[in-house]
Amino acid sequence: MSNPLFGMMGGNQAPGNGLMQKFQQFRQMFRGDPRQQVQQLLNSGKVNQQQYNQAVQMAQQFQRMLGGK
C-alpha cells in the first residue's frame, strides 16, 4: 500500500527536485485541520500506523526546516 501523504509531498524526491514547490502547492490547496485529516486517513484504513508515524516524522522535519519548533 502506498502512502498517500508521502505521495502528496513528492515521495522519495530529493529536496532540490521541487519538493518545496509541491509543499507550497499543497499548503495553498489544503483546507481544514491537518491533524483531523490525518486521523481520518488512519481511521478509514487508507494509511496504517507505520505510514501515520512516517507522516508525523516528515511533518516534524518540515516544521524544523521552516523554522518551527
Image: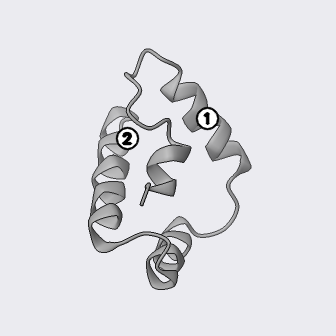
**Circle 1: is it few (<14), some (14-19), or many (20+) Cα within 10 Å?**
few
In this picture the colour scheme is one colour
Quarter in which the N terminus is drawn: bottom left
**What residue is at 62 percent from the left and 45 percent from the top?**
27
- The earlier-in-sequence mark between 2 and 1 is 1
Q: Is residue 69 visible?
A: no
Using the image as rendered, state which of residue 39 and residue 65 is in the foreground.
39
Q: Which residue is mark 1?
A: 24
Residue 22 occupies quadrant: top right
Furthest residue toward bottom: 43
Count of marks placed on residues: 2
Q: Is residue 31 left or right of residue 8?
A: right
In percent of width and height, residue 60 lies at 31, 50
**What residue is at 38 percent from the left and 33 percent from the top?**
12
Q: Is residue 18 visible?
A: yes
In percent of width and height, residue 62 lies at 37, 41
Q: Secondary structure at mark 2?
A: helix
Q: Amino acid at mark 2?
A: Phe
Circles 2 and 1, Cβ within 8 Å, touching? The answer is no
In percent of width and height, residue 44 lies at 52, 82
**What residue is at 51 percent from the left and 74 percent from the top?**
41
Q: CA distance from mark 2 to mark 1?
A: 12 Å
Q: Is residue 40 above or below residue 10?
A: below
Q: Secondary structure at mark 1?
A: helix
Q: Which residue is mark 2?
A: 62
Using the image as rendered, state which of residue 67 and residue 37 is in the foreground.
37
